[in-house]
Amino acid sequence: MQGIKSHLGAHATSLTLRASRNDILASNIANAATPNYKARDLDFKAEFDRLEGIKGDLATTDPRHLPTMQSARISALQYRVPINPSMDGNTVEMSVEQMQFSENVLRYQTSLSLINRKISGLTSAIKGE
């Protein structure tokens, strides 16, 4: 099983983090009209590096055990610094949020495509094709 995890590599971690970031960015967009709402975002690189280096909370007593997947930490969220702050204290800038969301979705789809290709390759190898 460790072979499957090493075969999928960092794409699985990336997919998990991208999904979390999509939720955060969608929340920012949904609260664009909420007074005093502070836009938040995830430092993708820092969280990715942290998750790739961690083995999980569970003890692995055998080298064949898979480490647990961890999601992004709430404490890892950072406040976005607005380019043009609004009068009501809201720091959501729709153009920035929409651009970040679109880029994140594109990267999510790319990671998903790469994982699908790797799984297809594994399936072909198992079937002996």
Image (cartoon, grey):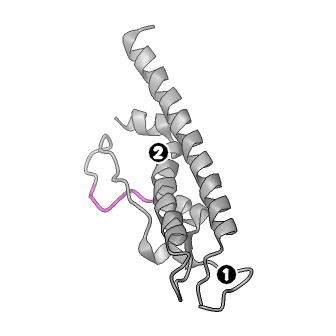
Three-letter amino acid code of the residue under disc 1 = Val
Residue that appears at 65% across and 74% down: 93
Give the image location of residue 27, x and y in percent.
48, 69
Residue 124 visible, this orientation:
yes
Q: Is residue 32 above or below residue 103?
A: below
Question: Horizontal placement of 121 versus 105: left or right?
Answer: left
Of the 4 image quadrants, the one containing the N terminus is top left
Question: Horizontal placement of 44 versus 3: left or right?
Answer: right
Q: Which mark is residue 81?
A: 1
Give the image location of residue 49, x and y in percent.
55, 60
Q: Is residue 83 above or below residue 101?
A: below
Magenta-drawn stretch, dominant element (helix, strand or loop): loop
Tell which of 117 and 62 is nearer to you.
Answer: 117
Work out which residue is located at the far top of the displayed protein and give it: 129
SS state under label 2? helix
Disc 2: CA contacts within 10 A as few (<14), some (14-19) or many (>=20)? some
**Mark toward the start of the polypeptide (1 vs 2):** 2
Work out which residue is located at the far front of the displayed protein and give it: 33
Disc 1: CA contacts within 10 A as few (<14), some (14-19) or many (>=20)? few
Of the 4 image quadrants, the one containing the C terminus is top left
Determine the CA span between mark 1 and mark 2. 30 Å
Report the magenta residues as a range.
Answer: 54-59
Q: Which mark is residue 12?
A: 2
Three-letter amino acid code of the residue under disc 2 = Ala
Foreground mark, 1 or 2, reads 1
Tell which of 111 and 4 is nearer to you.
Answer: 111
Residue 53 visible, this orientation:
no
Residue that appears at 54% across and 65% down: 25
